[in-house]
């Protein structure tokens, strides 16, 4: 069985044997992101391919990733998990993904 991740992300460490995870325990994937796979009720760790596609900007128009590195975050009304002056914004590529973005120069 071949597992697939949503959007431009790829299963980690492989599509045949991805690391399984729970959406309510996102830390199980480390720096990667726990996402629903193409197999019903199975969530897997996904790795963003955007690192390899710098021209693919997942931030909203007028915003860009910090230092061209994709940093995922959890949106919160009170505080942001993003460093510095960056904001946690919804990805333009994957609907349920949020990432740290700064205003473009």
Image (cartoon, helix red, strand yellow):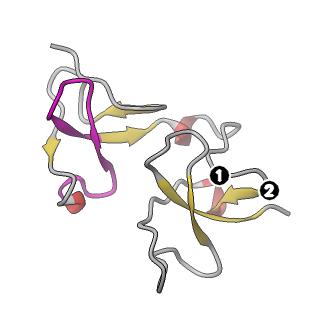
Q: Is residue 66 magenta?
A: no
- What's the residue at 60%, 81% (across, down)? 84
For residue 28, side relative to residue 72 (left or right): left
Report the residue that reaches farthest toward the top. Answer: 1
| Secondary structure found at label 2 | loop
Location of residue 89 in the rendering, given as x and y in whole percent from the top left corner: 58, 61
Depth check: give the residue in front, 14 or 43: 43
Rendered view: 15 above or below 61? above
In the rendered view of the protein, which quadrant contains the N terminus? top left
| Secondary structure found at label 1 | loop
Report the residue that reaches farthest toward the right. Answer: 105
- What's the residue at 41%, 67% (across, down)? 74
Q: Quadrant of residue 38?
A: top left
Location of residue 26 in the rendering, given as x and y in whole percent from the top left corner: 24, 58
What residue sits right under mark 1 in the picture?
59
Residue span colored magenta: 28-45
Q: Is residue 32 magenta?
A: yes
Report the residue that reaches farthest toward the bottom. Answer: 78
Which numbered tag is attached to residue 91? none
Rendered view: 6 above or below 90? above
Compute the Cα span from label 2 to label 1: 8 Å
- What's the residue at 49%, 78% (across, down)? 80
What residue sits right under mark 2 in the picture?
62
Q: Quadrant of residue 4?
A: top left
In the rendered view of the protein, which quadrant contains the C terminus? bottom right
For residue 25, side relative to residue 97 (left or right): left
């Amino acid at each position: 069985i071949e597992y697939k991740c949503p959007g431009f992300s790829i299963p980690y460490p492989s599509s045949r044997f991805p690391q399984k995870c729970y959406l309510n325990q996102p830390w199980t994937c480390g720096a990667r992101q726990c996402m629903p796979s193409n197999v019903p009720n199975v969530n897997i760790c996904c790795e963003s391919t955007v690192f390899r596609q710098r021209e693919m900007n997942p931030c909203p128009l007028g915003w860009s990733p910090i230092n061209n590195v994709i940093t995922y975050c959890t949106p919160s009304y009170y505080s942001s998990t993003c460093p510095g002056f960056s904001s946690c914004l919804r990805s333009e590529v994957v609907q349920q993904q949020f990432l740290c973005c700064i205003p473009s120069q």
